[in-house]
Image (cartoon, rainbow, N blue to C red):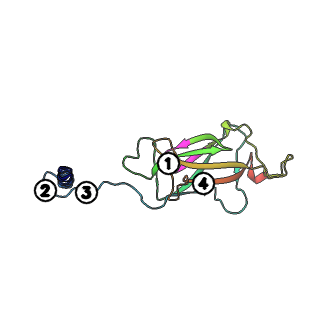
Amino acid sequence: MLAKRADDRRFRRVSALIALAGLVGCDGTVASDTDVGPLGDPALAFAVPAAAGEAPCLSLGASNDAELTLVMTPTELEVRPPGACGSSAQCGRLSLYVEGALNNESGVPAIALLARKLADPIHDGRPRLDDGEPDLLSLRVEVTTELDEPLLDEEGLPVEATLDVVTVPDCDAR
């Protein structure tokens, strides 16, 4: 038992010396801290289109190949391409889900909604015949980590933003 305690003390001393050596560089100066990125509660919100009031309208134009840019506002997190997060703990890429299906990914705080990947790109906001609910397109943008897992906030919930939108050829003609 005494030998184990002595070994534990020796281990702690050696560990402390190694840690101290790591802080002091070759020239005797203290090394700078590693940047671990933002540390507060991470959050994500839609900036464009704004998520206020009724469902925003996105114009598809005449082509079914439209790419509609969504701009996100990240808070206490970094949005970077895969492999670029380094030691930052609250970092990842944006993953856009439309009606629950992956539509696109991005390494910057903007992501394109790819209309060509939608079974039906037109959602005019009018009541549906089957249930009377407005015909809206449901968007969810989630932060995905380097390990292809959702980044979690302080409550253990995925860092994401959701928004229902209207998508028609021309919003001004509605």
Q: Tell me where residue 89 appears, x and y as whole percent.
A: 41, 51
Q: Is residue 5 left or right of residue 55?
A: left
What is the spatial separation of the Cα atoms under label 2 and label 1, in whole angstroms? 39 Å
Q: Marks 2 and 4: CB-CB under 8 Å?
A: no
Q: Which residue is mark 4?
A: 161
Q: Earlier in the sequence, mark 1 or mark 4?
A: 1
The mark that comes first in sequence, 1 or 3, is 3
Q: Amino acid at mark 1?
A: Val
Vertical arrangement, residue 50 with respect to residue 95, above or below: below
Kindly check if marks 1 and 3 are in contact, taking CB atoms under 8 A apart as contact: no
Residue 61 among those drawn in magenta: no
Q: Which residue is mark 1?
A: 108
Q: What amino acid is labelled 2 in the image?
A: Gly
Say which residue appears at 61% left-offset and 40% top-offset.
102
The residue to which callout 2 is attached is 28
Residue wearing tag 3? 32
Task: Decide: few, some or many residues near mark 2? Use Cα within 10 Å; few <14, some 14-19, many ≥20.
Answer: few
Please tell me which residue is depicted at 45% across the width and 43% down the height of the picture. Answer: 146
* Magenta-highlighted residues: 105-112
Crowd rating for badge 1 (residues with CA inside 10 Å; few <14, some 14–19, many 20+): some
Q: Please, what secondary structure does the residue beneath circle 4 have?
A: strand
Q: Give 139 or 122, whichever is nearer the viewer.
A: 139
Name the image quarter holding residue 72.
bottom right
- Tell me which numbered mark, 2 or 1, is placed earlier along the sequence: 2
Work out which residue is located at the far right of the displayed protein and give it.
129
